[in-house]
Amino acid sequence: MNRPGKEQIFLINSQQQFTDAALQVFRFQAENCAVYKEFITNLDVNPAKVKSVEEIPFLPISFFKTHEVLSSSAPVEAVFTSSGTTGMINSKHLVTDVGWYEESFRGSFGIFYGDVKNYCVLALLPSYLEREGSSLIYMAEDLVKHSENPNSGFYLSNHEDLFQQLKKQQQADKPTLLIGVTFALLDFVEQYQFNFPDLIVMETGGMKGRRKEMIREALHETLCEGFGVDAIHSEYGMTELLSQAYSKGEGLFNCPPWMRVITRDTNDPMSNLRGSQTGGINVIDLANINSCSFIATQDLGRIYADGSFEVLGRFDNSDIRGCNLLIA
């Protein structure tokens, strides 16, 4: 089974095209990803008999901690690693073609926000900057670069500099995106207050042990008050994926056309849920062509009739993830 090319994946514009591509990717990975192949075999699933997306098995995300999840024999170009506390086993996503990641996040950002050249991109991501292997930093650096705005850039703990730059952006009346890890945004608004209604504040989630976890409503209310905005945007992504979903408020996420979220029964991981019942989040990420596109995460959520989804928390005893993790 041949794998689909970038054109087939990133030009998906219908449900049928997604289904066809997903089944083609599944059969390719069932044959070429050793870990996934063994997983499917142990489930006694015959890939040739899988005729719908709903029948595709999802690989538990924990396999990225213990195995090399690869569907390609090409040289590895990048290794993205998850963040975690001391003693945790971190996930490793081996990427043999970073072009898939670049096309995915550039295309997704364009779908939800338009041309990045229209923005000044400010990144408050101290904990990610302090380590290597962050896929979020890779994406943010690319967005900063391609914004082609001399004022775009990263901030570590220099909150006063960020404060001054935000004031300049407000005075210049230029579209501005501030993307930040949750605890750093909270630290910032404890020092500085704004009334910048046109600012896009995008939190990537995660307290990383720096602050007490907050429910999403309380967190977003605090940030809205601090920045003087009506809504807080969010990004749902993780080390093991090459695509992101975005929320423009109320914690409701939408996926790009090559990504889909399905919920599974928490008591029967092989059974999918229908309607807006709360279940485990399974992600189909067709940009993950060279690893595994079918991932069973440890997040809990629900899906709505319009295709949007909400993240409600995590399974008990799961590692605290560095990406979007808020207990709601």
Image: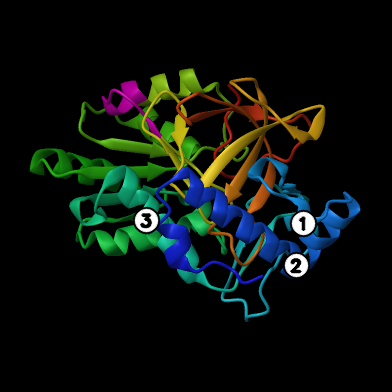
Q: Mark 3 touching mark 1, by CB under 8 A?
A: no
Task: Label 3, secondary structure: give it.
Answer: helix
Q: Residue at x 67, y 57 (%)?
A: 26
Q: Quadrant of the N terminus?
A: bottom right
Find disc 3 in the rendering and name its residue: 107
In which quadrant of the rendered view does residue 291 lie?
bottom right
Mark in front: 2 vs 1: 1
- Position of 267 compared to 54: left or right? right
Q: Nearer the viewer, mark 3 or mark 1?
A: 1
Instruction: Decide which of tag 2 and tag 3 comes sooner along the chain.
Output: 2
The amino acid at mark 3 is Gly
Q: Nearer the viewer, residue 217 or 195?
A: 217
Which region shows up in magenta? 224-233
Counting from the top left corner in percent of width and height, residue 128 is at 51, 53
Q: Which badge, 2 or 1, comes first in the chain's sequence?
A: 2
Q: Which residue is mark 2?
A: 31
Instruction: Kindly identify which residue carries mark 1.
Output: 47
**Looking at the image, residue 265 lies above or below residue 321:** above
The reply to whether discs 2 and 1 touch (Cβ–Cβ < 8 Å) is: yes
